[in-house]
């Protein structure tokens, strides 16, 4: 077995002689070479996080489909594809990325409430593994497009199991009030319709109840509801090949203690087995837990601004680079890259963007001077993939560390690139 893929947790960032490093490379050296702000990823951490899933599933028919909206850099996708990973995509653009990165479209599931006909046609042509359907209208659209192109679409129904994952309201998706999935009571009729359609093949069932879930209980609750449906369908001679439990496992940002992937999978497998479905292929769609801990956003202090009520460290990264704090009120760990002496103050760490919501961390105690480097940890997921060009700021560079080597996997955007697609009136 490839030792790279051994299922041991890898810490992406650690101190070497007091200085923060990613694998074998000092973050200072990365800032010198590539500038700031820069996203830094650890190859070993990404691969070990993926291996934790596959090791727990060893000996079972299974497929892990990385939810690439968490981080869709081609280098990240390519490493996962090489390791055998599938992908959960939510747009035609994401499918194009999988293919560009050397991923196998036959290991792709297509999620999302608003797939267009054009996206469905492209996914059918690529022969993806499965469309995860979210509505009757979508089922009809898939049948129509498949018929028009003479193909048969493999489908699963994304069930809304109406369980509370006890997470942030913006990232819970399996409640009755969410826009996602098919209401539990509507599921069987939808399957019956799908099973009768000539260009649709029913292959699975799926759910995704939310993100940042740090408890196994809601997963088991959802699993029971899904397994009830699997039994009900079998009673009507609709046999499913796979059960997809979605993603959503949290990571440790501060003091959270989410279960390890192996723990979650062990508990779910036990439930599936106890209910007599050992033969089903098990699928997962993890995003955050694969890439989150593997990445940091490296930023430099530009201005130290003492205030009447608050002291601010104005850094060169902003909400356009990392929106999680302002969007979800998320707490992210900030560490000085080099520990320094000097007086410690309480600072809000903010960006240069013209919005009061442009903050990255609040009320942190540290000693800092202009020019100091800070690392925002746990930024590998929903960091760069949610970045924007607000305030005409080019997006950050991204680098991947592999042992003692560093690869630039996305160069910094230039200002000219930001308006290259625009034109003025004659
Ligand atoms: C976002 C998403 C995921 C991944 O969620 P994480 O919390 O990042 O693991 C999985 N499946 C679907 C359908 C999603 O929308």
Image: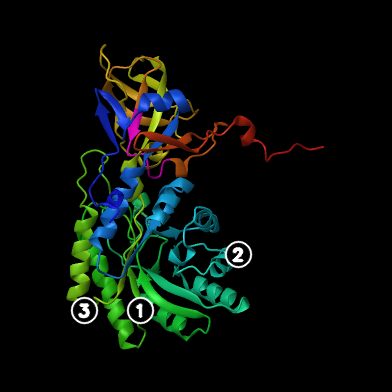
Quadrant that contains the C terminus: top right
Q: Nearer the viewer, residue 60 or 170?
A: 60
Location of residue 283 with respect to 312 vertically, above or below:
below
Q: Residues within 10 Å of mark 1 (few under 14, many from 20)?
A: some
Dot 1 or dot 2, earlier in sequence: 2
Q: CA distance from mark 3 to mark 1?
A: 13 Å
Residue 246 pos. (x, y %): 34, 61
Tell me the number on the disc at residue 118. 2
- Quadrant containing ligand 1 reads bottom left
3 or 1: tag closer to the N-terminus = 1
**Which residue is at the far front?**
1
Spatial separation of the CA atoms under disc 1 and disc 2:
27 Å
Identify the magenta region: 375-383
Residue underneath mark 3: 276
Q: Residue at x 34, y 32 (%)?
A: 376
The percent coordinates of residue 69 (x first, y second) are 44, 51
Residue 126 lies, in percent from the top left, at 54, 66
The residue that appears at 26% across and 39% down in the rendered structure is: 11
Q: Tag 3, which secondary structure?
A: loop
- In the displayed structure, 133 sits above or below 353; it is below
């Amino acid at each position: 077995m490839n030792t790279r893929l051994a299922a041991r947790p890898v810490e992406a960032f650690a101190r070497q002689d007091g200085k923060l490093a990613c694998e074998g490379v000092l973050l200072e050296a990365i800032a010198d070479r590539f500038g700031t702000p820069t996203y830094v990823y650890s190859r070993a951490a990404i691969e070990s996080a993926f291996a934790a899933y596959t090791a727990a599933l060893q000996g079972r028919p299974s497929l892990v489909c990385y939810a690439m909206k968490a981080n869709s850099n081609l280098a990240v996708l390519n490493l996962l594809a090489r390791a055998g990973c599938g992908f959960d995509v939510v747009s035609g653009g994401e499918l194009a990325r999988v293919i560009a990165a050397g991923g196998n479209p036959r290991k792709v599931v297509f999620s999302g409430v608003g797939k267009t006909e054009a996206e469905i046609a492209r996914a059918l042509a690529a022969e993806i593994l499965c469309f995860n359907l979210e509505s009757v209208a979508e089922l009809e659209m898939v049948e129509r497009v498949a018929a028009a192109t003479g193909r048969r679409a493999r489908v699963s129904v994304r069930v809304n199991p109406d369980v509370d994952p006890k997470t942030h309201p913006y990232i819970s998706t399996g409640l009755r009030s969410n826009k996602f999935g098919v209401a539990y009571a509507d599921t069987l009729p939808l399957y019956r319709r799908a099973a009768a359609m000539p260009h649709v093949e029913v292959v699975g069932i799926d759910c995704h109840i939310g993100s940042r879930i740090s408890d196994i209980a809601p997963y088991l609750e959802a699993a029971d509801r899904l397994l009830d449906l699997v039994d009900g369908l079998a009673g009507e001679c609709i046999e499913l090949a796979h059960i997809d439990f979605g993603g959503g496992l949290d990571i440790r940002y501060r003091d959270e203690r989410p279960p390890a992937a192996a723990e979650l999978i062990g508990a779910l497998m036990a439930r599936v087995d106890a209910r007599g479905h050992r033969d089903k292929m098990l699928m997962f769609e993890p995003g955050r837990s694969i890439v989150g801990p593997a990445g940091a956003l490296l930023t430099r202090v530009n201005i130290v601004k003492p205030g009447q009520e608050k002291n601010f460290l104005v850094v060169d990264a902003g909400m356009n680079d990392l929106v999680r704090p302002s969007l979800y009120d998320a707490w992210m760990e900030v560490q000085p890259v080099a520990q320094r002496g000097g007086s410690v103050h309480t600072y809000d760490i903010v960006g240069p963007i013209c919005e009061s919501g442009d903050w990255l961390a609040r009320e942190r105690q540290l000693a800092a001077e202009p020019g100091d480097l800070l690392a925002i940890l746990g930024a590998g997921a929903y960091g760069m993939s949610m970045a924007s060009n607000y305030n005409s700021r080019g997006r950050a560079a991204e680098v991947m560390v592999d042992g003692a080597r560093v690869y630039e996997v996305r160069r910094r955007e230039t200002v000219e690139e930001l308006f290259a697609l625009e034109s003025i009136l004659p």
